[in-house]
Amino acid sequence: MRNRPEDMPKIELPAGADDAHLSHGIAIRDWLDALPHAAAAFSFKNNTLSIVAVNDSFRQHFNLDDESRKRPHASEWRKRILRCARSDKASESFELRRDGILGPEYFSCAVGRLPEAEGQPNLFLFTALDRTSDRTIEKNLRRELLSDGLTALPNRTGFGEEIDDRLANTPWPENAQFGIIAIDLSRFSRVNESLGPMAGDELLITVAKRLKSSLRQGDVLARIGGNDFAIFARLNNGLSDALHIIQRIRDALSYPIRLSDLQIRVDCAIGCALSISLSDEPEDIVRKAQAAVKIAKRSGKVEIYRNGVLKEAQRRFSVESRLRDALAQGELNLAFQPLIHLQTGEITGFEALARWKDAELGHVSPVEFIPVAEESGLITQLGRWAAYEAAQALSRWDAKFGQPLPVGINVNLSPIQMARDDVASMFEEALRYSGISGNRLTAELTESAIVADPEKARKLLFALKDLDMPIAMDDFGTGYSNLASLHSLPIDILKIDRSFVGSMLEDRDKEIMVRTILSLAESLGLHVTAEGIETQELAHALQNLGCWQGQGYYFAPPMAESDAFDYWRARWNFETV
Ligand code: C2E
Ligand code: MG
Ligand code: MG
């Protein structure tokens, strides 16, 4: 129950009580002794500060002998009282730190001027409250806030503070620069997923130790994200110093790390950014190094930040976040490009190609957003959407036509999607949901998907065959064509990449490549589709070479669902009359 106001004890102030004088028989020392903290009274006359009285606590913590004057922080309180005495301020408060002295370290101090009395020197009251335990708690909290609990390295915030401290409090030669080296442990999440978080932690600790061993004095190592480390380094010789440090990092991480009974080789991507002058904002340079490391993850090389890289990274970032929304809100479309039987001119099917028009970014090409989707993990969702949408498009066309169309749709699969998702059940569901038979959905995959994990790819391909789906090898000729895998895997179609097809009439080497693929396919019993046919001559040349199927702007560009249907129906009518 709350106290009612009338329950509150009243404090009466008798007339004249606020006017009690020290001279009423009580010595100043007694007043000071009544206080629980250090207190002293000083007089100031002829520019000299003299002690009038001090209490025991003051005597204990504030050394009064002359020896103490040699320590700058020990005499700090004298200076502050003097400053107050010389000014015409009524009071002043300040914090005092007594570093390296036994006993309390932090005091919250106040100096107040007592009223002047005729003919008397000015009197000042000084009090000092011990704040050591508060400050220690604050300091510990701050340390926790600024460091990473696992590796005890500074975290991102701590890194910023360390850099500011190094830049402000250590001498820097005239033309020195600083550099930030960002390191991303590429396979870290795999370790976490397959060996568990304990092993992941152990890996991080070992990497932190190794990185630390590659530092020079004065460099700062930090863990600025889950698997992201960064180094702040002073560079007296610009980039060449930075490259030196990078070499040391690579050496330090080159030999395998032992995790329980496994030996793990750590792969890392390294990006670096250099300041132009010492007044550059460190946070900017950190961001630039992170942009460089993103590029390094793709290129597999050490990347040094160039102008424009950041723009690229920002663009990637906005593509990623807009794509996430677009997928959630169903804003992507499929376009359908006809696949033409080169000998008969018949439309045998369509390739489904993802299309995205964003309100802010405009039309974004799949050449740009597919890699972003792959890097961000959105590819699983995108791939699922494409498979369902393609199967649904077929069922809508069938419904419009009144019976199943004699065409199928090719759906592109990304190697990342194949590695992460259960693609076979995805197709099974898509087919079941739309009532489409498996032979009408062709999976287009690339050679890199097979190279990445041959055993997994093999299982998947056979599972797709169980669904009766044809399988096409996309962009054939551009990857590491492994003839053995072509022979042993259930592949039905090779799609010759348009970089060979487009220029085969002008470029003898390309023509030889196309002919070789055609004869290889013949001996393996595979069909061939030529991509990127833009002219009639090319269509004829490929027809004469015996190529089965063609795709390209010469026949038709990718079209909206209803246009593709109309295109097919117009030709189908024509062919049947
Ligand atoms: P792709 O699978 O090789 O698709 C063929 C690309 O060639 C398409 O580019 C198509 O528009 C383009 N093309 C067709 N005919 C011609 C021609 O005569 N001349 C030229 N110069 N180009 C032609 P698009 O639509 O920009 O797609 C690019 C790539 O993006 C695709 O290459 C495919 O790898 C990927 N992609 C598109 N949609 C999806 C999807 O739904 N999932 C996945 N995983 N990848 C997709
Ligand atoms: Mg394709
Ligand atoms: Mg292709």
Image (tube, grey):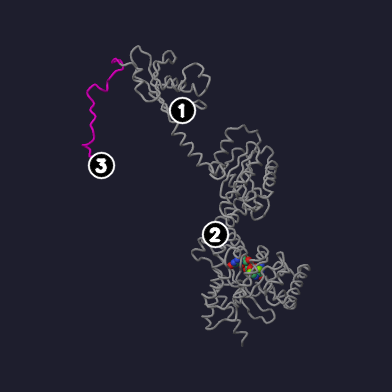
Q: In this rendering, is residue 264 above or below 505?
A: above
Amino acid of disc 1: Pro
Q: Is 200 displayed left or right of 520 in the figure?
A: left
**Mark nearer the N terminus (3 vs 1):** 3
Q: State how far apart marks 1 and 2 are (Cα).
A: 61 Å
The residues colored magenta run 1-25
Q: Position of residue 134 (x, y in %)?
A: 43, 34
Amino acid of disc 3: Arg
In the image, the residue with mark 2 has its CB under 8 Å from the nearest atom of ligand 1: no
Q: Which numbered marker is on residue 443?
A: none
Of marks 1 and 2, the one in the foreground: 1
**Residue closest to the far left:** 6
Q: Is residue 280 visible?
A: yes
Q: Position of residue 409 (x, y in %)?
A: 59, 75
Q: Give the residue pinned by disc 1.
A: 104
Q: Residue at x 54, y 39 (%)?
A: 161
Of marks 2 and 3, the one in the foreground: 3
Q: In this rendering, is residue 401 above or below 46?
A: below
Q: Give the residue pinned by disc 2.
A: 361
Q: Give the residue pinned by disc 3.
A: 2
Q: In this rendering, is residue 17 above or below 446?
A: above
Residue 184 belongs to the span the image colors magenta: no
Task: Write down which quadrant ligand 2 falls in.
Answer: bottom right
SS assignment at label 1: loop
